[in-house]
Image (cartoon, rainbow, N blue to C red):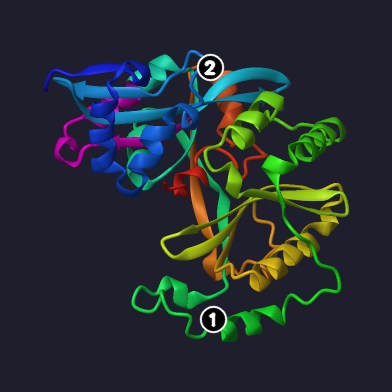
């Protein structure tokens, strides 16, 4: 085994980090090098993203994003495990396992949405996983996902007309920019925390978390919210690789029976404003949104967790009951500068 060194990301030279990011994160390397302090919530806690190096060459990273969890009424500091990567030429040499074990020594409570390669490593180290959360999607113009014709507008109006017939309403809603109306969003979150009973395990989205996630976000200009009947949704509206997307990041319903109507109104706005894809995250097997997000576009996400405390582990292995698209890097990994 080659001699390696594991350090906190803040101790690594930016030039070495950039070289690594270029090789493993491709389109995201500029976004990461410019914003890793935000991405990994630097300064919030003692937990930091870990970097594995060989003779000053960065060959691996295990990202950490601190998050507070409610576990049986107690607030515990945990972390999302994300942006886990090893340089291709160093894979299969055990560095992924070494880095993950060091991560587990550093942070006693860890949660993640991961791919199959990462799952293969963490399962061998005692992590548990489930597939109770899914990504929902509704392509409005499917031609945008065919490389040879994606840059042409052929058929766009036809597809929009066909889908629009399913989402005709007398009412209409308009998005508002969060950076111009932050006080409205903050008040909505305060009402939610007052009126709702927080279940366990759950993510604690307090004022510090909210300001970090929305107002310090490097793409805050693309964050909006919709309101309808005292319910609201935070959305990310942006273009990525020629596809204009609307990601529903977080939704709050005073009356859950409004969910289908509210999402239908958002879809109606999307169709009329040249959105190509609407995307959301949904936990559980509830099928109330299947007419908006057809099951054929539904994709299960892999959630995994671990804790050094067995009592905590028994709770968090079932996944936070309120995880949404705004959490971890489910949405933010799509940001490209």
Residue 325 in the image: x percent, y percent?
A: 59, 46
Task: Say if residue 283 shows up in the picture.
Answer: no
Residue 84 position by quadrant: top left
Question: SS at mark 2?
Answer: loop
Distance from the alpha carbon under mark 1 to that under mark 2: 53 Å
Task: Say if residue 214 shows up in the picture.
Answer: yes
Up the image or down, 270 lies above or below 193; here it is: below
Q: Residue at x 36, y 29 (%)?
A: 62
Up the image or down, 80 lies above or below 239; here it is: above
* Numbered disc total: 2
Q: Residue at x 48, y 36 (%)?
A: 112
Question: SS at mark 1?
Answer: helix
**Which residue is the extreme one toward the front?**
180
Residue 106 position by quadrant: top left
Q: Which residues are magenta?
A: 80-101
Q: Residue at x 27, y 18 (%)?
A: 6
Residue corresponding to mark 1: 156
Up the image or down, 331 lies above or below 63; here it is: below
Q: For this view, does 137 lie left or right of residue 200?
A: left
Towards the viewer: 168 or 217: 217
Residue 140 in the image: x percent, y percent?
A: 57, 73
Return the mark for residue 309.
Answer: 2
User: Crowding at label 1, few (<14), some or many (≥20) Cα neighbours within 10 Å?
Assistant: some
Q: Quadrant of the N terminus?
A: top left
Towards the viewer: 245 or 201: 245
Q: For this view, does 69 lie left or right of residue 257?
A: left
């Amino acid at each position: 085994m080659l001699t390696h060194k594991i350090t906190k990301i803040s101790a690594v030279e930016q030039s070495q980090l950039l070289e690594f990011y270029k090789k493993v994160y491709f389109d995201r390397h500029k976004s990461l090098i410019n914003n890793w302090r935000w991405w990994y919530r630097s300064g919030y806690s003692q937990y930091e993203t870990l970097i594995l190096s060989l003779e000053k060459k960065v060959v691996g990273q295990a990202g950490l994003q601190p998050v507070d969890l409610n576990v049986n009424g107690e607030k515990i500091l945990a972390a999302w495990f994300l942006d886990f990567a090893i340089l291709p030429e160093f894979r299969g040499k055990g560095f992924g396992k070494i880095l993950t074990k060091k991560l587990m020594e550093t942070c006693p409570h860890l949660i993640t949405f991961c791919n199959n390669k990462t799952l293969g490593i963490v399962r061998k180290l005692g992590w548990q996983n489930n597939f109770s959360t899914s990504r929902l999607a509704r392509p409005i113009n499917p031609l945008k996902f065919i490389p040879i014709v994606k840059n042409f507008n052929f058929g766009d109006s036809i597809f929009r007309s066909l889908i629009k017939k399913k989402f005709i309403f007398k009412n209409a809603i308009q998005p508002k920019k969060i950076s111009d109306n932050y006080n409205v969003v903050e008040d909505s979150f305060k009402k939610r925390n007052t009126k709702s009973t927080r279940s366990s395990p759950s993510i604690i989205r307090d004022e510090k978390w909210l300001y970090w996630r929305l107002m310090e976000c490097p793409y805050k200009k693309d964050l909006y919210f919709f309101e309808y009947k005292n319910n609201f949704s935070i959305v990310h509206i942006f273009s990525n690789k020629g596809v204009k997307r609307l990601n529903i990041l977080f939704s709050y319903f005073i009356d859950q029976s409004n969910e289908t109507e509210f999402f239908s109104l958002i879809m109606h706005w999307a169709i009329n404003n040249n959105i190509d894809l609407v995307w959301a995250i949904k936990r559980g097997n509830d099928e109330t949104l299947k007419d908006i997000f057809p099951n054929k576009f539904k994709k299960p996400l892999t959630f995994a967790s671990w804790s050094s405390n067995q009592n905590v582990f028994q709770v968090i292995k079932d996944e936070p009951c309120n995880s949404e698209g705004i959490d971890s890097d489910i949405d933010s990994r799509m940001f490209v500068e």
